[in-house]
Image (cartoon, rainbow, N blue to C red):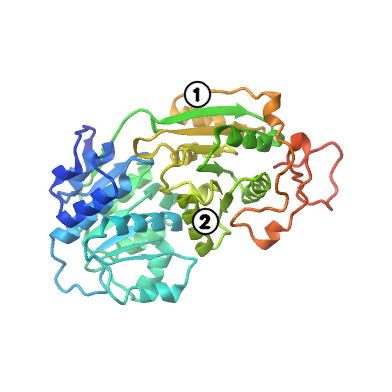
Amino acid sequence: MKQTLVIKPTLFTELNLPESLLKGIEELGFTEMTDVQQIALPMTLAGKDVAGQGRTGTGKTATFLITAINRLLSTEPKQGRSKHHPRVLVIAPTRELAVQISDDAAKLAKFTDLKLHTVYGGVDYEKQRLGFEKGVDILIGTPGRLIDYLKKRVYSLSKADMLIIDEADRMFDLGFINDLRFMLRRLPKYDQRQSLMFSATLSHRVLELAYEHMNEPEKLRAEDGDVTASGITESMYHTSMDDKFPLLVHLLRESDVKRGMIFINEKRTGEKVARNLARYGFSVGILSGDVRQQKRTRILDDFTKGKLHLLVATDVASRGLHIDGVSHVFNYDLPEDAENYVHRIGRTARAGSTGTAISFSCERFCFGLPDIETYISRQVPLCHIEHEMLQIGQPTNPEATAEGLKKEDKAEQGGQAGRKGQPNNNRNRNRRRPSGRNSRS
């Protein structure tokens, strides 16, 4: 496998793309290519297979979508191809990522006649099945739903021209590798299609997958050194668990955050944080595995449009979300996996912009800090907590709640001020607890 590290600045207009595709690129406001695009696009547009590594926000999605759309516009379909034979298959590990890819693809293909279809779990099965009836050129989806329709012969992969796997390392993390291999065996042979695979890390198992199912792929890495985006200002507060919420409220107020993401490790913590932020007057939604797909999509849409200023999320939402203008990322809980630190803070400072990443290191999750700093090859700058920063007063709207909470989650009312002005976070008021111990948030 070859490796390319040379960066050659290029404009999209220099790539000899079809006019209809260029029009879509221009309407999105893209002119100059990112480092990943400068290296990858000349190769992928020439038909080469690529296994690419790049941090979040580097333009990976646009790279493979531009390549796919260009291929479909400039080459004829395989002989015998019917409307039930997608020409491009895009596999993503999560529903959120599939939706984001679909949205980007629709914008780039806006001025073409290409038919796109996206499938994923959690929404109406029959409605998505009917989406195949008019024909599909580019099929985007998550492994489970893609396999369901494939096994029922709703579509066939035998005439596919191109395979794209995004967030390949996440496929392994979520246990989708067997599903992935099932689909890859239904595609034309590796030398009869083009294959692109992108991953945050090119680990041994990811490269093994590339060798097994790709045609002498180029191994691409756009940049060495810093694994986090250069435009991110990072900081760390060493704080107790009880002080995390008032500190968060203070920082949100101080910076007047209009679009921020708050990451937590556990769903129940997220529910408490989101609920209490709403009580303190913040416009907030929560994104976790328990939120139904239709609701999740609406919450993401409201956050993107600015109707919600804050989004509380578990790591299910930290990979693959392409939301412009996120100014702040808060690690309310330090991630237990060092790589997730990079994925989380990569939600800000996308595509050359700047952003702020603030992390709380508490007594429960501080043990992951050494691994994080080893992974990013530096120490995160520490900030001091002043006593006044924790005096946040009483909730301004005790009856408010966050978008995405179930009714039973909303039932926890009361808004009593706890220690340092934060709401009472007791998990169960009827449960006896040893005196003198505070519940964890």
Give coordinates of residue 257: x percent, y percent.
53, 38
Q: Is residue 161 left or right of residue 309?
A: left
- Snapshot quadrant of residue 388: top right
Residue 348: x %, y % from top left = 44, 39
Mark 2: which secondary structure?
helix
Disc 2 target residue: 299
Q: Residue at x 32, y 50 (%)?
A: 209
Above or below, 72 against 242 in this view is below
Question: Would residue 83 appear left or right of 146 to someone viewing this image?
Answer: left
Q: Position of residue 412 (x, y in %)?
A: 74, 54
Other-residue count near label 2 (Cα within 10 Å), few / some / many at <14 / 14–19 / ≥20: many
| Left or right of residue 411: residue 298 | left
Q: Is residue 137 above or below residue 390?
A: below
In which quadrant is the N terminus drawn?
top left
Where residue 379 is drawn, which disc sits there? Answer: 1
Residue at 52 percent across and 39 percent down: it is: 337
Q: Is residue 102 left or right of residue 94?
A: left
